[in-house]
Image (tube, rainbow, N blue to C red):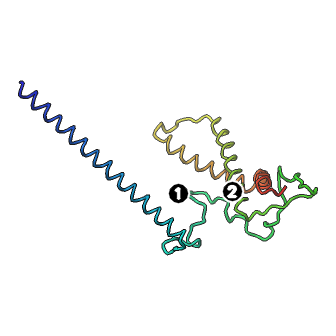
Amino acid sequence: MAVNGIAGSFITGTLSNGAQTVQAAQEKADESRFLSLIQDMTSKKEKEVAGDFAGSVSSSQVNKSHRLTGDYTEGFYNYYTSEADKNAAPEGLAASVKNAHGKQPTIDRTSELYAQSKELENYMMKMMLSSMRDTIHHTSLFGKENDFARGMYEDMMYDNYAEALTKNTHFGLADQIYLELSGNR
């Protein structure tokens, strides 16, 4: 019995030492990859400072869709494209705003700032609809197995509701945000 105890502790000690050795090797490999990544970044930065842009990406190659992979809504970028949208009057809540000269400011709805403002208004609409949705009592007609699928479908449906409300109701919240951030008041 004493032999089994000694042999068992020898095997256990050897296995734990082996696991520690593997872990140390993995940490060393991770450290090596991290240091090489930093070195690559540093050398690219030095090349950029020196004026060598051979490996860089031109601005025309950068994706400006402002959409994430998996987005299923259209968003607000490039939604307003007409010439009239470049000098539009504020709507909704922002219609009563006057600038320092007592005149109504104009809004460039084709700008990226306005698209970002619309995204923020859309997010607020989503929050409002989500709060309203939480007040609805759901029955489980088909059981619990469909709760996840139903929830996912409803999330997508309410996201589309929020986007449609933001595009069509002219609350003016995005206009107010745009005026505040652009300094066009």
Q: In this figure, which residue is indicated by the disc labeled 1? A: 70
Does residue 55 lie above or below 19 as drawn? below
Query: Mark 1 Cα within 10 Å, few/some/many (few <14, many 20+)?
Result: few
Q: Tell me which residue sits at (63%, 53%) in the image.
A: 160
Furthest toward the top, the residue is: 1
Q: Position of residue 52 (x, y in %)?
A: 51, 74
- Give the residue at x 83% y 55%: 91
Residue at 66% x, 48% y is 123
Number of the label disc, if any, that sits on residue 170? none
Q: Is residue 90 left or right of residue 64?
A: right
Q: Quadrant of residue 36?
A: bottom left
Distance in Å between CA atoms under marks 1 and 2: 19 Å
Q: In front: 185, or 40?
A: 40
Q: Which mark is residue 116?
A: 2
Residue 26 in the image, given as x and y percentages of width and height: 30, 49
Label 1 is placed on what type of residue? Answer: Gly
Secondary structure at numbered mark 2: helix
Element under disc 1: loop
